[in-house]
Amino acid sequence: MLIRLATASVNQTPLDWKGNRTRILQAAQVAMEGGPEAILFPELCISGYGCEDAFHMPEVWSRSRQSLDILCEKLAGIAGTVPVIVGLPYMHQGLLYNVAAVIHSGSVTAIVPKQHLAGDGIHYEPRWFHPFKSGPDHTGPEGLPFGPTIFDTGRFRFIVEICEDSWVDNRPASQHAGSSYDAILSPTASHFSIGKQRIRRQIALESSRAFHCAYVSVNLLGNEAGRAIYDGQTLACQNGNLILESPAFSFQPYTVSQIAFDPEANRSKRVQTHSFRESISIPPGGVLESATVRLETHFKKEFGFRLPEEDRANPTAGNNQVGFGRGEPQSGSLKPEPRPESQNRPGIGFATPERDVADSLSNDANSATQSSSGSKPSGENASGTGGGSNIAIPGLVSEKRHGSAYLEFLYATSLALFDYLRKSRSRGFALSLSGGADSAACAVLVERMIRLGIAELGLAGFLKAIHREDLLEAPTLRGDDLSDSRTAGQAPNGSNRSSASDCTPDNSSSADPALDRPESLVRELLFTVYQGTAQSSDTTRNAAYGIATALGANHQQVSVQSIVENYVETYEQSYARKLTWAADDLVLQNIQARARSPFVWMLANATGSLLIATGNRSEGAVGYCTMDGDTSGGIAPIAGIDKHFLRRWLLFMEQTGDPHFGPIPALKAINEQQPTAELRPGDQNQTDESDLMAYDLLNRIQKLAVRDRFGPEQILERLVRDCDLPREDSMLRPSIPGSEPQVPNAKTYRPFAGDYSREQLIQAIKKYFTLWSRNQWKRERIAVSFHLDDENIDPRTYFRFPILSAGFIEELEELE
């Protein structure tokens, strides 16, 4: 006997009541094509997870409940007797809970509240919600069960375990173990962090093994509220074996996965396992008081969705109507309006326990583990309100996107930029392109976001999603002459224009000019400017032009030297004092950085673009940035990642690149440079590392201070210990998975172990903590950044620190 389940990951927006409902209903329609016996949606999918303190507003509770009622009415016609699990904030007896509502036959049959609230890292759930504690009253409004519940469909039994409830020892699954459930269904809102997927996979595998059941979780999708990113992934395991690890980081408004598992195999395993039978007699935390709800279902014996006869020769043909639109399907419409047969989408198939684990990670877009995605197709009808998914590059969203830190960073940040662009309704991105690593990385991320978006959604679908349908009439996208349109600025003297082949795959071919030449669309969405001063070099000027040309940005070169001179002259005349580099180094550096801000802000305003702030986390940690200079901007896409990682990522993108579009050779001009602010006269040979310390050492100190919460003495102990180890045993070898690029400058990228004396380490630790404490006010003002790993220094979401403090004076003195 096989039980069929469907999961639906949705890209929601906080407080977008109609839009959130629409995506839930559209996804449910697609899910029903596979004949599931239950449909699982993510945590808090009705309201959005990131409502923050708006969760305290009665309006949010009432509208969440209204949305639940509307969903019940419409799902009665879409899902019938199939249980549908959705998440929302729910007021019960004067307390607000994070709950999962189980909808069946047009009504809510039970409310399952979350028992363990996430209160670490970026999570502040205890600020808004009350954790459910078992008590005598488990009855909600209208006599509904409110609390732990066993759901019995007659064919299988399942429980609901909300996100954090699966991450703790005294979990509902343990307390319910004696109830002989067949599946744990886990709606989640588990934020992205580099390497975190390994932990989630381990929890899923171990949960299914320990409880001899199927474990199925589904995550939210996209950059929901501005900072946290969700990968949209479904994980399904049975008896310790991976059934499905679905595609991640889709640009679609939702994705649907289908899973099949054998409950009889689970039951047999439970009976055979003596230790399991012993453990359920007295589960950890005692026996959980719970209700049992019987869900009468009308099971259809046919296995899966049967295509119309004329489409069976083409198993990818489909007709689901989807999109980012806000119009809700009508109650009772089991299937969307048909689309032309030529508009394909991935076929709906099933992941089953009989399939090999390797198959569940297959790159084959038509494999049985394939998720179906909601999207508009490419083609002339793609600009409408719906359409089937047509993946322009086969397998684009079906390959495994977790595992390499470099690719995880690329895909997660690209998706975050896409969602930020469309949800803010901005018209593009503006960027001060300095010719250095940070601004180049930001430009690459925007360009890859555009390429990935076009490839997955089609040109018209991508432009509709970002509210730029007007660009369909742009001359560059109509295939007009583009010979001089990649960059509007002139090539620097003595430099060669980079070839478009630097970033365009050789095998690209499409009737859509934006797919063959995506730089034509990049030029309409990415505006870059190189702003030179007397300290600027030909090296950075040429590098900025080269990467802008290779990516297709709309690039200009201007000089702000006269602006700098005017400010300096005005000061000197006003205060009758000559400014010199010997006495006024900081003043003369900062005025150059600040002189660049007005023009790029003007560019952003004139083009309706988001201004990108280019600072990275290493600079933010020690305040190596100019407020209202290089920190100017509304979004800081790399402020959540350290410079040590970023430089290696740029090498990876130069030499290897992502599997779809390949490397970007033009980055070589960036990677060959030593990082420099280029604010002092050239004869001073200014570099970032001479101003601060080696980035590898800075990164290690920051990791120990931010991630591990160690103080100066504890950090010194660990760094000294590491320096005494052989290089191959060093704790500081690359700790994040991902193929290491070939390093062009071994001295710049030296291994850590053995490179520093104790005195050097002490001085580095002193500098770090002194600068960290002095510059908290800067971190409070850094533009919105994305959460990318467990070393986040964002004081609004992750690591809080006093703006005014003693600055570890005693601790640093004791290091001697």
Image: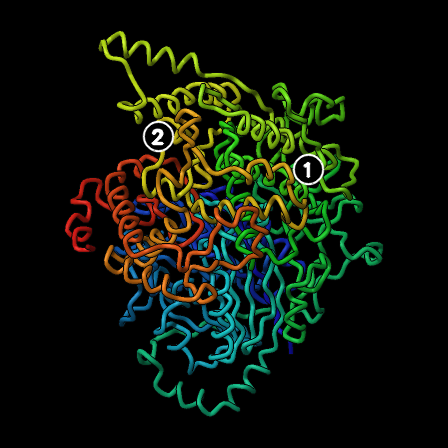
x and y, in percent, of residue 573 in the image: 27, 7
Which of the pair 524/265 is nearer the observer?
A: 524
Residue 46 shown left or right of residue 356 in the figure: left
Which of the pair 623/365 is nearer the observer?
A: 623
x and y, in percent, of residue 356 in the image: 66, 73
Name the residue: 50% across, 20% down.
603
Task: Judge the density around disc 2: few (<14), some (14-19), many (≥20) Cα neighbours within 10 Å.
Answer: some
Residue placed under numbered mark 2 in the picture: 626
Which of the pair 545/631 is nearer the observer?
A: 545
Q: How is the image coloured?
A: rainbow
The vertical placement of 325 against 173, above or below, is: above
Instruction: Label 2, secondary structure: give it.
Output: loop
Q: Quadrant of residue 240?
A: bottom right
Q: Amino acid at mark 2?
A: Thr
Residue 774 shown left or right of residue 457 in the figure: left
Which of the pair 172/79 is nearer the observer?
A: 172
Q: Amino acid at mark 1?
A: Asp
Residue placed under numbered mark 1 in the picture: 502
Name the residue: 76% across, 21% down.
481
Name the residue: 62% across, 30% down.
546
Residue 531 shown left or right of residue 308 in the figure: left
x and y, in percent, of residue 301 in the image: 69, 71
x and y, in percent, of residue 575 in the image: 22, 11
- Quadrant for the N terminus in the image: bottom right
Distance (Cα) linking label 1 and label 2: 33 Å
